[in-house]
Amino acid sequence: MRRIYLDNASNTKMRKIIIKIYKNLLYDKNISNPSSFHFLGRYSKYYIEKSREGISNLIKCKFSEIIFTSSGTEGNYIIISGAIKNYKIKYIITSRLEHLSVLNTLELFKEKIKIFYIDNDEFGNLNLNQLELILKNKTNYKYNILVSIMAINNEIGNINNIELIGLLCKKYYSLFHSDFIQYIGHYNVNMKKIYCHYFTASAHKFYGPLGIGFIYIKKGFEFKKSINIGILRNKIISDTDNLYGIVCVYYALKIFYKKYKKEKNKILKLKKYAIKLLNNKVKNIKYNGLSGDINRSSYNILNIRLPVKDDLLHVKLDLINIIVSIGSSCYSNKNKSYVLKYILRRNIYKNTTSLRISLGIYNKRKDIYIFVNKLKKLLLW
């Protein structure tokens, strides 16, 4: 039986053209250490700088504002710790629904900096009135506050109003960092229209390779002081660049922009079909967060809640070649979703089972049909 992969929010499979580009680079005998001053080094460095230039053109930012990293986790750590060390940050405002790479990084600084977690409702909507109130009351001087709010929640697919959050940060002279991991490569990002000082991106979320990503650092808000992992690329990290990954992250993003509308429409149709089929086949099904609302959630994420308690349901699906998740892949070993824990009432959280279905360009209508019917049988077992 063909394996049905419905965990694209954790990782997307590389496009064939990206694999081909990667292989061609591996066989290029002129590729060397890009940090070297000889011809082969300069030849290799050219690939990196053209990729940086290409990404900056795609998202409408300056060439120097793109810095390559190994992952979203590294990127979030660099930005948060770098902002704290380089600016007189007294307060950080975030939410309990952020990615663990953000929450765990913030834990490192909780003894020195006051952290405010803004409230959310049972659908995962963030209280932006509370955000503004904190900004208004705690702004003592320019950039003494760092706001860290993700663009799209990786578990429930909620689209946060980063345009409004950015405007609030601009109004109260606060730094704004946003985790763009589930946003860039799924939506058209134009930095001329978003007020944001820092964001993170990771190639494996948009059909590029694992182990490569990039961060955006707005000009004028760079990190002059070094942070724990050294003086960063382009004056932030000192190490050998992942040339193969860097070139591929650029091409993966370039292809996304070229095929964005067509692929978005395809995946959105699959999500609509999944909701319709689930509603017809599974009794008392609910949707966590705003994932069941196609206008207020990411078009590729659907988080369902079932009226039974079965902590092994995702394992049972795995055994019949259907891959789904129970939450963030970075937290899956805990067999719990910390996001759902914070948005659901305790009795609902303890007595129901939730699954995250995340769709991609390689999914087909029949994948949804098979998944829903197999799920129904397991629930009746």
Image (cartoon, rainbow, N blue to C red):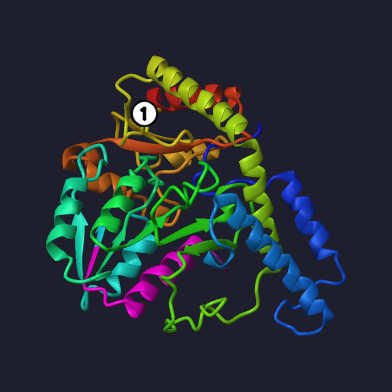
The reply to whether residue 97 is in sight is no
Q: Is residue 297 magenta?
A: no
The reply to whether residue 73 is in sight is yes
Question: Residue at left 59%, top 64%?
Answer: 63
Position of 377 relative to 45 (above/below)? above
Looking at this view, is 255 or 203 the one in front? 255
Looking at this view, is 53 or 123 the one in front? 53
> In screen coordinates, is 14 left or right of 318?
right
Q: Position of residue 215 (x, y in %)?
A: 50, 63
Q: Position of residue 98 (x, y in %)?
A: 33, 54
Indicate the quadrant where residue 294 lies. top left
Q: Within 10 Å of the Cα at label 1, are there few (<14), some (14-19), or many (20+) other Cα atoms?
A: many
Q: Which residue sits furthest left?
A: 137
Indicate the quadrant where residue 351 lies. top left
Residue topped by disc 1: 292
Which amino acid, mark 1? Gly
> In screen coordinates, is 195 left or right of 258?
left
Q: Quadrant of the C terminus?
A: top left
Position of 202 relative to 188 (above/below)? below
Position of 273 relative to 1 (above/below)? above
Q: Position of residue 179 (x, y in %)?
A: 41, 56
Secondary structure at numbered mark 1:
loop
Q: Position of residue 123 (x, y in %)?
A: 25, 37
Magenta extent: 68-92
Question: Residue at left 39%, top 57%?
Answer: 196
Question: Residue at left 38%, top 46%?
Answer: 153
Q: Name the dominant secondary structure of the magenta segment.
A: helix
Question: Residue at left 49%, top 20%?
Answer: 273
> In screen coordinates, is 314 left or right of 147?
right
